[in-house]
Amino acid sequence: MAKISFIIPTMGRDSLGRTLRSIERQPQDEILIEADIPKSNLWGNNCRNSAMQRATGDYLAFIDDDDFYVKGHRERMEKAIQEHPGSLLLFQMRFPNGEVLWKDKDKVPGNIGTPMILVPNDKSKLHFWKEGRNMADFIFVDHWKGDIVWIEEVLTELGHPYVNFGIEYEKHENE
């Protein structure tokens, strides 16, 4: 079984406890929490970069302190790792209104979010997170030096109302 490093940037939100409780951790897995305090306005990207340097897992999983994993996520991760070893894996994530990102398997800005990424911890293939928010998730994936596999299963839910393309989504209760 693969060792997964769960990387969580935090701004000290109360929702961090919920995020941590959602992780179905195996004994070999590790959780790396990186505080962005005082807030740097880098949207957690500096925290992800720092935690990636310390991560000892075979794979890296990224989730923010206001998002959470759905039940059965660890089993889904392990199955995808076994079926596609060495590939960057892009799962789906669900917005609070129930809408799912991604619908199409397109590596384009706006179709990729941090909590959907599961990637081998291979420093020769990884790209660091770009500072700032604009397209950082897309850039991280776009610079991956290997295969990318789209997994048509929801792995995470955003735990907050989210504004995307001018549409504000309502909170979706699905715990």
Image (cartoon, rainbow, N blue to C red):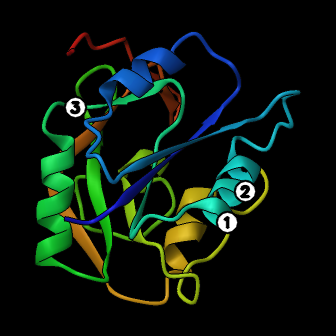
Residue displayed at 50% across by 23% down: 66
- Residue on which the image places disc 3: 70
Q: Secondary structure at mark 1?
A: helix
Q: Is residue 12 above or below residue 138?
A: above
- Residue 97 x/y as whole percent: 29, 20
Q: Is residue 173 visible?
A: yes
Circle 2 packing at 10 Å, graded few (<14), some (14-19), many (20+), is some
Comparing 118 with 103, the one in front is 118
Comparing 141 with 163, the one in front is 141
Circle 1 packing at 10 Å, graded few (<14), some (14-19), many (20+), is few
- Name the amino acid, label 3: Val
Residue displayed at 47% across by 16% down: 17
- Name the amino acid, label 1: Gln
Count of marks, rendered view:
3
Tell which tag, 1 or 3, sits nearer the viewer.
1
Label disc, if present, on residue 53 of the rendered structure: 1
Residue displayed at 11% across by 76% down: 83
- Residue on which the image places disc 2: 50
